[in-house]
Image (spheres, grey):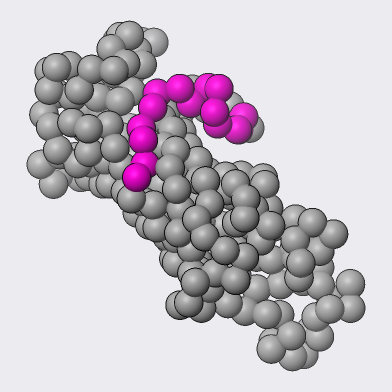
Amino acid sequence: MTTKNLMRAARHPLLLAGVLGLAGLSSAEAGNPPGPVHFSGLLNDYTPSAAVVKGGPYEMRGQWQLDLDQRQSMARFSAEMNMETSDFGIAQGTVDKDDPTTRGAHTHHITMSDGVVSSDWQSLCPVLSPVATGGFVVTGTAYITGNGSPAPFGNPSPLTLCVLGGSNVLFSNITLAFGSPASKHFGMQPVHGVVQACVGPWGRQSPDCSVDE
């Protein structure tokens, strides 16, 4: 890692822990200011086909928020998502292109309050193309609604979040991987999204989620 990137990594204690071998130390022990760090962004992806997900493939569009507690290495995550059958449903005969009501539009609210933060992203996260060069992973339990009520497929479900990035933007991508029973609806593949912004411990916009020109 270059001196420039090491200095940028030092702005985020989780990444610095992975670089300097400080995994397991709290942010205070690592010499970093304590307190939560806030990330936010968008989700944009598709579920597998109807052979895997009933009614699929669905389009998934939404927004998400992630708050890290550096002292406890814990995290809280939430997301709001719209889903409806993609145009592939026209070819399958399950969607009438002139009738939007045939697309099965619905919403999900996703929350996780018991997230555990780890720097072990290389073994737990999907391989991106172009490949990611750093990041962190959050594992926990998700509770999910369907149109504002408990999801019909059941609760709770394991959830793995990966926040990854590269040399120009340290935190650029997020993926969500659901376990059963939510995987029956979203699929077992990672759901992809983008990091739009992140805020440092003192409420200031962090440059770690934008291009360093």
Which residue shows up at 50% across the image and 45% down it? 159
Query: Is residue 5 shown left or right of residue 96?
Result: left
Query: Residue 28: horizontal and vertical position, in percent?
Result: 12, 22
- Residue 8 in sight: no
Residue drawn at x 13%, y 46% is 203
Q: Position of residue 59 (x, y in %)?
A: 65, 65
Q: Is residue 23 magenta?
A: no
Q: Residue at x 76, y 67 (%)?
A: 54
Quarter of the image where the C terminus is located: top left
Q: Nearer the viewer, residue 105 or 151?
A: 151
As drawn, 4 above or below 166: above
Which one is in front, 110 or 17? 110
| The image quarter in which residue 11 lies | top left
Range shown magenta: 114-128
Number of marks: 0
Q: Does the rendering let one see residue 75?
A: yes
Front residue of 8 and 128: 128
**Residue 124 within the magenta-colored segment of the rendering:** yes
Tell me the quadrant of the picture where the N terminus can be found: top left
| Left or right: where 126 falls relative to 17 | right
User: Residue at the location (49% across, 72% down)?
Assistant: 150
Measured as percent of width and height from the top left, residue 64 is found at 40, 56
Q: Is residue 126 left or right of residue 110?
A: right
Residue 14 pos. (x, y %): 30, 25
Q: Is residue 114 above or below residue 73?
A: below
